[in-house]
Image (cartoon, rainbow, N blue to C red):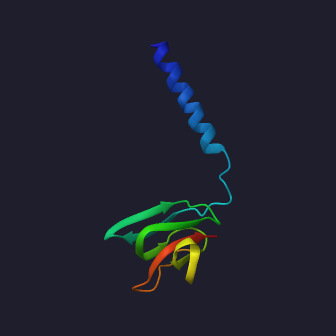
């Protein structure tokens, strides 16, 4: 019985430590959702400042994060930029190839 209890207590202690550590302040909290190839996708808690290229064209962006997101018509965060405030979605028919948070 003691052999089973010790690993469980160790795991619970580790989980408690992880839950009490401060979160990274440079990440947008929440999901950024979009569609690509007819399928829904999301990025959870994306880091600020990093440019994400879509593997194929994307559309219908929704910024569920707590910070701003900017979608770009071109790869590597180039081309026409459309800024999405927290909780907002892109204009109907908006296609994008990359996104940056923060």
Report the quarter where the N terminus lies: top left
Of residues 88 and 2, which is closer to you in this image? 88
Measured as percent of width and height from the top left, residue 85 is found at 57, 78
Report the quarter where the C terminus lies: bottom right
Question: Taking the image as drawn, is residue 84 in sight?
Answer: no
Task: Identify the residue at horizontal 60%, vertical 74% (top origin).
Answer: 68
Measured as percent of width and height from the top left, residue 31 is found at 49, 64
Instruction: Give the quadrant of residue 10.
Output: top right
Q: On screen, 52 above or below 59?
A: above
Task: Identify the residue at horizontal 68%, vertical 58% (top origin).
Answer: 25
Q: How many marks?
A: 0
Measured as percent of width and height from the top left, residue 15 is found at 56, 37
Task: Identify the residue at horizontal 64%, vertical 64% (top origin).
Answer: 48
Q: On screen, 12 above or below 21?
A: above
Please indicate whether residue 71 sits to the left or right of residue 58 in the image: right
Question: Taking the image as drawn, is residue 14 in sight?
Answer: yes
Instruction: Give the quadrant of residue 92.
Output: bottom left
Q: On screen, 17 above or below 93?
A: above
Measured as percent of width and height from the top left, residue 3 is found at 48, 14
Residue sitting farthest toward the left: 38
Of residues 58 and 74, which is closer to you in this image? 74
């Amino acid at each position: 019985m003691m052999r089973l209890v010790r690993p469980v207590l160790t795991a619970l202690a580790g989980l408690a430590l992880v839950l009490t550590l401060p979160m990274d302040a440079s990440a947008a909290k929440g999901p950024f959702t979009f569609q690509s190839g007819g399928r829904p996708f999301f990025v959870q808690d994306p880091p600020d400042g990093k440019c994400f290229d879509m593997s194929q064209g994307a559309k219908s962006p929704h910024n569920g994060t707590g910070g701003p997101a900017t979608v770009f018509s071109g790869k590597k965060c180039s081309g026409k930029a459309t800024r999405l405030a927290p909780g907002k979605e892109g204009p109907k028919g908006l296609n994008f190839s990359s996104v940056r948070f923060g």
